[in-house]
Structures are given as structure tokens and as C-alpha cells.
Image (cartoon, rainbow, N blue to C red):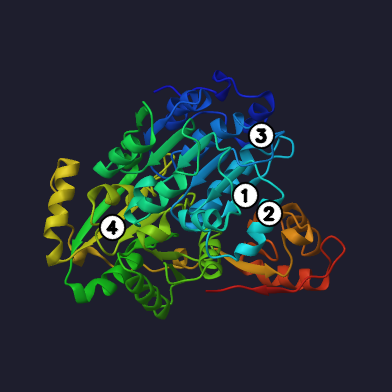
Amino acid sequence: MTQLNFSKFPLRPEILENLTNLGYKQMTPIQEQSLGPALKGQDILAQAKTGSGKTASFGLGLISNLKLDKKKPQALVLCPTRELADQVAKEIRRLARMLPNIKVLNLSGGTPIGPQIASLEHGAHCIVGTPGRIGDHLQRKTLQLNGVKTLVLDEADRMLDMGFLEVINKIVSYTPSYRQTMLYSATYPEDIVSLSSNLQKNPVIIKIAETGAQNDIEEHFYKTPLEKKDKLVNDILNHYTPESTVVFCNTKQQCQDLADYLSSKGYAAGAIHGDLDQYERDHVLTLFSNKSLSILVATDVAARGIDIDDLKAVINYDLARDPQVHIHRIGRTGRAGRKGLAFSLVTPKDSFRIENLSDLRKNEVLFDDIRSLVSKRGSQLIPSMTSIRINGGRKNKLRPADILGALTRNAKLSGSDVGKISIFDFHTVAAIKRHKVQQGIDALSDGKIKGRFFKVKTLSV
């Protein structure tokens, strides 16, 4: 399919200019097929995985249809996890940054509800959030949805897996019946079709085939006894030495146990799962995304919404219960023409899952010999970056450019020595090349950022 420029669609000139500045010059398949119906206000039922560009596909339609002179919720985006809600809210703000006085508010759990209530009192055009927290606000009558024209359910299949159907229906009952409803799902089970029939009217159905990305993935399956799975993960990492790896487990406890095991072996590993509070989850995700951690161990629910550029490898410590989820997991690597690696650990109890996966792929799963794994452990398993925490953030009017300027000016670092800079309300996390990190800390501790001194320290899991 030929990719086209966004100017094909009737977007505002300032939005088109912003897209060019952001590097959104060519549309992905999901954007090309869904943006037209989104702008026309049509309902959409789309199957598209994480990393396909779906946030922009509904985000552009959403912001284009807002009446900016009316500061009341006109769009609602529901997400299964706090991480995904945060990512979606940030992306919509980026897409809308050249529109005057637009307000996008994230209402998710894991953070105090008081500040959210205060923000709602000042109005907002677009609400992004998790079903649980949105439901809390509706119960408290701190959120009004009677002006919502656009409803988006992002990762709808995962919200159903998490048991949110009842609360979703309750939330929808607060919205007008004449709204536009866009439903995005990575997989297409029967309950998604049922949900669509209850919420949508004659939706445009879009399915993006998962083909091209899979061609860039080198996949391996290993048979192993249950008690030797930890050692096998260690052997895989030592043989292939991927710079960044996501390991999937099916339970929260297994996630934490495996991350602890890998840390004891000297790996820079961290876990995210439902037992961690929001700060802990944000902390681990930030370190992994800026290359200060090499390995992230996660459940499927916790990993939804994580979109890491150039992820080198995926390891299925536990096979997914649904073969579609398996395809979704490994599709996080091997993107944009890059090569990816995917490994699956198969125990004697997994025979039915392997059969289901073979049926879906329409070919037999072949197993590799564990004896072929030879330790080559080297520098690639050591994170290339180290993160520092600066005790000042968005509330202190700090911007990434301020941090980069201070590091290049005061610490005499080059731009290539500094990685991702993440600004939070009251602190900032910046990634610096490992061998230059002390140089950066010393300079920031002795110098000023925007005329002020801030405490600085290194971060670890």
C-alpha cells in the first residue's frame, strides 16, 4: 500500500504544520484508513497493534472536531492502564500543541484524586483516563460527560480482559447517544464484536494485517522443564546479548521473582506489574525507555502502552494463553525495517498453547536445541546510559532544553552524550552515557539551571 501525506485530508493548516515539525510526514496503514472516517465523525472498529500509529489516527480526528471556545469535555479516551493513558495524553498534547489554549487532562488511578478535581474545575477539552478513575469522578459528580462528542476505547480487548466491561458501560451511559465512538483493539475476539454492537452504529471496520513487521523477527522456541526456566533465560541473554529485552510473565509474582533472579546474576533488570505503585512503575519504565536498564520483566497488562524504540528482543518466559497475544508480544521488536529477536520457553504443560499457535500461524512450531546456546556475554548487556534525577520539574518551569543546555554548557558534554530527558511535575530524569555521568552530576551540582541550584543524584532500580 502506498503511503500518502497527511495533506490528503482536510486538517487545519496549523495541525499539518505541526505534523511536519514532529516528523509525521507519511501515514501508517491505520492512519490512512481511519483518519478519513474519524474526521467525518463516523464510528470506527479497528484492529491495530501498539506501535502502528493508532494514537495519531484517532487523536487527529479528535482534536480536529473540538470546539476550542467551549472548555468542557468534548472527547473521552479510555485506556486499560495508567501507563497507556499517560502515553496517549502526551501524544494528543503533542499533536495539538499549535492549537490555542487546548487542555488535555489525564484522569488515571495511582495518583491523588484531589489535584484532578481541582483541574476539572478549570475545565478541559479532552479527557484521557482509566475506567476505574473515570468512574470515581462520575460517582463524585466531579466530571460531566454530557458534552462528549467523541468516545475512544483504546486497547479495548485488554480492558475487557481486565474485567472493565461493567464500568465501561456505566461510563458510556453518561455520554450522549449521538456521539462518535472509535474502538481500537490489538486482537479481535468475539467479545469485542459484542461490545461494538452495543456501543456503535454502523462502524467502519478496519483490520491491519500483521505481516511486514513479522518478517523482521528471528523467532526461537526452546523446550525446558519448569524448574530450569530461569537458567534458560540467563543462557539466552548470554548467547545473544541483546541491548534491550522485554520478558513476559503471566503472573505478578513471577515477574518480580525473575527480575530479582536476573539482578542477582548482574543484569540491569527491573519489573513492572500490578503490585507496584504508580511511582515505582513510572520509575522502572523511565529507566528502561532511556536505556539505563537492559531488561524489563512485565505482565501483559502492565506492558500495554509501552512503546520502546528499537527493542532488540522479546522473551516469552510464560507462553501467552491466547495465540493472538503471542503475536502482539513479539511484534514489539523487529519494527521499521530493523531485525528483532523473539524467544519462547515451552514446558511440558504448554503443548495445547503450542498447538493453538501453530493453528494461527498455519505452520508447525520448530524447536531449537538448548545446547546451541553458548555464553558470549559482553558489554552489550551493560546499559549504555545511566539516569540522573534532578530535584526540579514541570512545576519549576524546567524544560528538556534547559537540562540539555546545562549539561552541554556546564558539564562540557556533547549532545550525543545526553539521552532521553523526562520532565515530571516535581523532578526530572535525564540519561547520560555511563562514562560521562559523574561529569554531568558534578557540573549540575555546582552550577545552576535557569538561575537556580537543584539537587542531583544517580538513579537505579
Q: Are marks 2 and 1 in contact (CB under 8 Å)?
A: yes
Distance Cα–Cα, label 4 vs label 3: 38 Å
Distance Cα–Cα, label 3 vs label 2: 29 Å
Point out which mark residue 343 bears. 4
Point out which mark residue 119 bears. 2
Distance Cα–Cα, label 4 vs label 1: 39 Å
Q: Counting residues from the N terminus, which is met first, the one under dot 2 or under dot 1?
A: 1
Is residue 423 visible from the viewing direction of this image? no
Q: Counting residues from the N terminus, which is met first, the one under dot 4 or under dot 3?
A: 3
Distance Cα–Cα, label 2 vs label 1: 8 Å
Q: Position of residue 131 (x, y in %)?
A: 46, 53
Residue bearing the label numbered 3: 21
Q: Counting residues from the N terminus, which is met first, the one under dot 1 or under dot 3?
A: 3
Distance Cα–Cα, label 4 vs label 2: 45 Å
Q: Nearer the viewer, mark 4 or mark 3?
A: 3
Q: Amino acid at mark 3?
A: Asn
